[in-house]
Amino acid sequence: MPKVLLRELAYTRSGDKGDISNVGILAFDKANFEILRRQVTPQKVKEHYRDLVKGEVEVYEMPNINALQVVMHNALGGGATKTLRWDETGKSMCLAMLYMEIEVPDGSKLAEPP
Amino acid sequence: MRKIRLGAGSGWAPSDPMLALELVEKGQVDYLGFDQLAELTMAVLQITKARDPKRGYVWQHIIDGMKLILPPAHKKGMRIITNGGGVNCEEAANQVLSIAKEKGLTDLKVGIVRGDDVLNKLEDCRKKGWKFNNLDTGEEDIDRIRDRIVSAHAYIGSDGIIGALGEGANVVITGRVSDNALFVAPIMHEFGWKFEEPYWDLIGAAVTVGHIIECASWCCGQNSVLWEKVPKPWAIGYPMAEFYEDGTAIITKVPGTGGMVNEWTVKEQLVYEVHDPRNYVMPDGIADMTTLTLEDLGDDRVRVANMTGKPRPDTLKVQIGYSDGFIAENLTIIGAPKALSKAKRMEEVGWERLKQMGLKRENLEVRIDYIGINSLLGPVVPIPDEDSINEIGFRVAAKAKTAAEAQMIVSAFAVLTGTPVGVGFSAPRQPRPVIALWPTLIPREEVLIDFVVREVS
């Protein structure tokens, strides 16, 4: 199956609570959501973020708004107040998600970004 | 059907009171909620208060902001709820009352909510066998940091605000309440809801709507994935929610302003800083965000319906702040040609110099960023070809027990120690003290929330 970057299927936004970074993935439509919910697994997220994320990863589904919620532990250098990261609150963590490779079915016509 | 109109006047500090003023003048809301507190803010305010007992509230908001906003808001009958009281709500209230007097608002009543400061409860709880487990690291209790604790604040809910509104307060000043309590409280007050069956779905709806607007313009196209399409972001409007008694709401913004509210700007705020969306645990109730529906009505209006919730938890979240050394950092800018090779050489110079000082790399907390190459996305994106790089920001940050030690480590990587040609530098930043946070829980019954209402003297 051909591969595309996640950014062709969804928008993302990230936030922080302590040392936990979360990335919300907003699929452009239901079809994209179905593709993403199967492929954006905790293991795949962990491999993708490499040493940016040192702890466990959880993925939650919000089928009502075609969204996934990715929660990454031990990901912000101890949290905003003590981290050595320039991006203390991990606002840019959502950008890294956009570069994840996702397989899409042959010949599928993807929704245009809204 | 009855409805209540809520506006968000800030989502962080320092905030621009002019945007809140626009909300007062053009927004037609019943209640204005001002979120001024982030995780770090309480600890910083605690330190400020330790130096000067008359401080410890968000000065710019309570003084400058209120001078601007209080007169027109009060004239229009808008009530204000702010967590800008920080760690000194009494003094913040004194300031607001004196501004009211100065502006001739003699009938103004100010409510003060107390009980979020649980610093002197920690030892009591421990004696009863409670352990302040670190929610981030799993560490069992606070023994390791006990002698360095500077603050402990529980995220309290709407109880005290509802009480003060019931006593007729026009302005309610709080410390560390949950951000969404600034909006849950007026909703519950107006509709007479209680923390019991059958209100949990409705409270879940109030928590969810509070969450959508609590970061102010962040649901109106700020920090947005749609940044290229956002109209007039320099004149961005603050959000308003029309909340109906049946637990549905319309999210919109101040008319005639920049920014935008649509399905996507609401969605991006919905997922913002939420973990398990079925269980968004807040002091007033647990919102389930997986049942709600969004309907984009156009004209910057989005309807939110089918929101649900569960009973409020028996524990409250607490942030314990403790002193944790100092951070020093330095930035130099390296120009082409061979910018990447020069950055690598600078890094090598620093490590070698530290070795000469007898310091072992594995014992140090140091971070090196090549800005323009890897400072944000790190190893997720490939390093570009060196010939295509015009310049690199070489940033070094170090954390150590003392300011001098942190500065010494950073200086090893700075210029004047054998660096390559043509490195741009400017005056170094001063090392800063670190207040680390210990997120934990406290039994709800240990947190005694009350309020008082004061009048202009």
Image: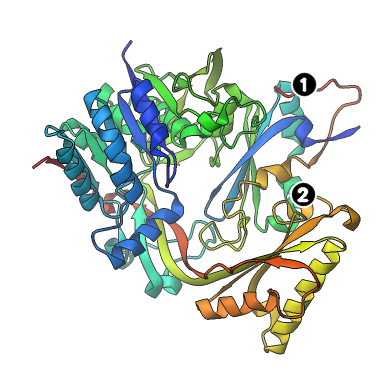
Q: Quadrant of the N terminus of chain B?
A: top left
Q: Vertically, is B110 above or below B209?
A: below
- Foreground mark, 2 or 1? 1
Left-right relation of B292 to B286: right
Identify the coloring.
Answer: rainbow
Assign a secondary structure to mark 1. loop
Q: Give the numbered dot on residue A48.
A: 2
Q: Amino acid at mark 1?
A: Ala
Tell me the crowding category of disc 1: few under 14, some 14 to 19, or many 20 or more residues within 10 angstroms, Cα based: some
Q: Residue furthest top?
A: B1
Q: Position of residue B21 (x, y in %)?
A: 36, 31
Q: Which amino acid lies under the numbered mark 2 shown in the image of this protein?
A: His
Image coordinates for residue B377, horizontal then vertical, percent = 73, 51
Disc 2 with disc 1 on a shared chain:
yes
Q: Is residue B371 above or below residue B269?
A: below
Of pointers 2 and 1, the one earlier in the residue sequence: 2
The picture quadrant where one finds residue B186 is top left
Q: Is residue B219 visible?
A: yes
| Rendered residue at 52%/69% (across/down) | B430
Residue at disc 2, secondary structure: helix
Give percent across and percent down for residue A99: 78, 42
How far apart marks 2 and 1 lie (CA) works out to 24 Å
Q: In which quadrant of the rendered image does the C terminus of chain B lie?
A: top left
Instruction: Please determine whether, in this image, residue B194 is positioned above or below residue B342.
Output: above
> Taking the image as drawn, is residue B176 in sight?
no
Residue with the mark numbered 1: A111
**Residue placed farthest to the left in the image?**
B457
Q: Decide which of B352, B113 is in the foreground and name it.
A: B352
